[in-house]
Image (cartoon, rainbow, N blue to C red):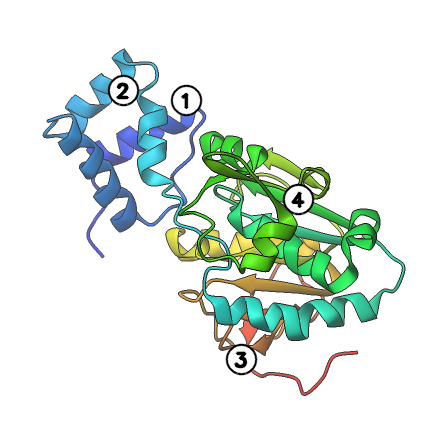
């Protein structure tokens, strides 16, 4: 690993202490690549010059965040994962707590496609009326612009192209140029700005989806974020990570339910003085 670049670290310190944007937990290689891409767009060659630009252009940090917090998502992205959720995981969650509120959290929700995909599966499993009664959704992101799109629930023809035609008709209102997600179901979602590396987690959650977010964090921040997720989940709760994320260690405070799809169950009680690990062993059943 290359030694820290003092000029780059000064840039991160400015963002943290003067703009409230703490990027210090992100992997340096990823940060450097994306900051340099933004600098090339502005024809700026070095970090001190870019720091001066940030200081003199009050909204530049927002443009930089848009570059760093890239929101790559889509409805039912990685279809096999969603098939597993629909066939195995969601029915198990429903069986575990009949006639109780089901609380789900999309952590790093980007433009909202993930939480709406999950809500469709829950509505299919429960029926729309029961879903409206028994499901509470939370969708959070550090990017306010992405949250704004998510709150609106408005998508172009190309953005909804991967949704089954019957679901598109059932869960979206079509306009001349866009599709709007089911208004009543949308009101079951609480959207909010949330920094996974700093803010307290939402509690009493049955299912957390945090897909391809942790890969941007350094190992220590990954661990602290997973500690927060462990706290957030109910005893029988589940965590779904992204296809690029895996944690294979021996202490089972998270237990792999399906490694192929990166689905984990809450395992042993967490000793806050110890490191967090995830067991690769898949239990035959959880009841």
| Horizontal and vertical percent position of residue 34 | 25, 41
Between disc 1 and disc 4, the foreground one is 4
Q: On the rendered image, what quadrant is the C terminus found in? A: bottom right
Specify few, some or many for label 1: CA neighbours under 10 Å numbering under 14, 14-19, or 20 or more. Answer: some
| Alpha carbons under labels 2 and 1: distance apart | 10 Å
Mark 1 vs mark 3: which is more N-terminal? 1
| Residue 6 falls in image quadrant | top left
Q: Disc 4 designates what residue?
A: 138
- What number is the disc on residue 19? 1
- What number is the disc on residue 264? none
Specify few, some or many for label 2: CA neighbours under 10 Å numbering under 14, 14-19, or 20 or more. Answer: some
Specify few, some or many for label 4: CA neighbours under 10 Å numbering under 14, 14-19, or 20 or more. Answer: some
Q: Are marks 4 and 3 in contact (CB under 8 Å)?
A: no
Foreground pick, 163 / 137: 163
Q: Residue furthest front?
A: 176
Q: Are marks 1 and 3 in contact (CB under 8 Å)?
A: no
| Residue 235 falls in image quadrant | bottom right
Q: Are marks 4 and 2 in contact (CB under 8 Å)?
A: no
């Amino acid at each position: 690993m290359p030694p820290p670049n003092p000029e780059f670290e000064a840039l991160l310190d400015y963002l943290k202490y003067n703009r409230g944007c703490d990027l210090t937990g992100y992997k340096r290689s990823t940060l450097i690549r994306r900051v340099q891409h933004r600098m090339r767009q502005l024809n700026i060659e070095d970090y001190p010059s870019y720091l001066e630009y940030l200081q003199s252009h009050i909204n530049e940090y927002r443009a930089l965040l848009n570059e760093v917090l890239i929101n790559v998502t889509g409805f039912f992205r990685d279809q096999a994962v969603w098939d597993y959720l629909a066939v195995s995981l969601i029915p198990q969650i429903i069986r575990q707590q009949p006639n109780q509120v089901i609380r789900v959290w999309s952590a790093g929700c980007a433009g909202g496609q993930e939480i709406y995909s999950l809500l469709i599966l829950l509505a299919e499993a429960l029926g729309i009326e029961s879903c409206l009664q028994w499901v509470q959704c939370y969708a959070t992101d550090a990017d306010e612009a992405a949250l704004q799109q998510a709150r609106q629930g408005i998508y172009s023809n190309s953005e909804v192209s991967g949704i089954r035609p019957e679901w598109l008709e059932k869960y979206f209102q079509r306009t001349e140029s866009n599709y709007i997600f089911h208004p009543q179901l949308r009101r079951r979602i609480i959207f909010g700005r949330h920094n996974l590396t700093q803010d307290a987690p939402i509690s009493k959650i049955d299912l957390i989806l945090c897909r391809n977010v942790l890969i941007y964090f350094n190992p220590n921040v990954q661990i602290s974020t997973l500690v927060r997720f462990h706290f957030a989940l109910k005893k029988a709760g589940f965590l779904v990570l992204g296809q690029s994320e895996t944690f294979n260690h021996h202490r089972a405070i998270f237990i792999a339910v399906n490694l192929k799809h990166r689905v984990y169950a809450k395992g042993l009680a967490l000793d806050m003085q110890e490191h967090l690990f995830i067991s690769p062993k898949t239990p035959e059943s959880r009841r």
